[in-house]
Image (cartoon, rainbow, N blue to C red):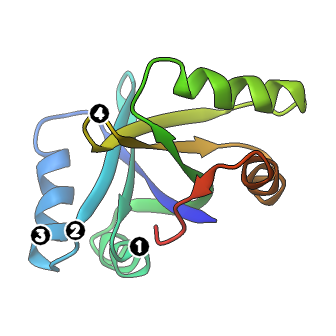
Amino acid sequence: MGKQLSIFVENKPGKINKITGILEKEKINLKAMTIADSGTFGIVKIITDNNRKAFDVLKKSNFLVSFQDVVVVEIQDKVGSFHRVAKILEEKGINIEDAYGFIIEEGGKAALILKVPETERVEKILKKRGYKLIENF
């Protein structure tokens, strides 16, 4: 099971720079990031090469930060790859609450990050269907 950090931030210039600056200073590599705007505030979701350290340094810098379990699944970088995963989960009655992805190898592999209820169950379902989980996040 993977972990992501969610950081609640005021939606104004310099906030993202502050987060990325802290990570750079602490030599924490940012692996994935997404920003959700909700008006005055937003939620920045990140995965790093050291989530525990990132959590600690961001908390120490007065950011409101939390951990969430996520499923990180390897898919092909091809049309329909996300659709196939979504269809499997729908057939099992599982809602995808949040998702984002990134290319690992252009034309080859991509990573799909899913926030779902029952992460362990989703991991078992996807493994049984032949998907590889990326667990070092």
What residue does disc 2 label?
A: 29
Relative to 33, is 13 above or below?
Answer: above
At mark 1, the secondary structure is: helix
Q: Nearer the viewer, residue 67 or 33?
A: 33
Distance from label 1 to label 2 (Cα)?
10 Å
Separation of disc 1 and disc 3 at Cα? 13 Å
Q: Which residue is mark 1?
A: 51
Q: Earlier along the polypeptide chain: callout 1 or callout 3?
A: 3
| Picture disc at residue 96 | none
Instruction: Residue type at mark 1: give it.
Output: Asn
Q: Position of residue 118 (x, y in %)?
A: 82, 52
Please identify the quarter of the rendering in which residue 22 is found.
bottom left
User: Which callout, 2 or 4, points at the residue further toward the start of the chain?
Assistant: 2
| Kind of residue indicated by mark 4 | Gly
Do the residues bearing badges 2 and 3 touch, measured as CB atoms within 8 Å?
Answer: no
Residue at left 70%, top 49%? 130
Decide which of tag 1 and tag 2 comes sooner along the chain.
Answer: 2
What whole-number distance in Å separates the C-alpha atoms at marks 2 and 4? 24 Å
Q: Is residue 58 left or right of residue 121?
A: left
- Pick whichever, 32 or 106, lies toward us: 106
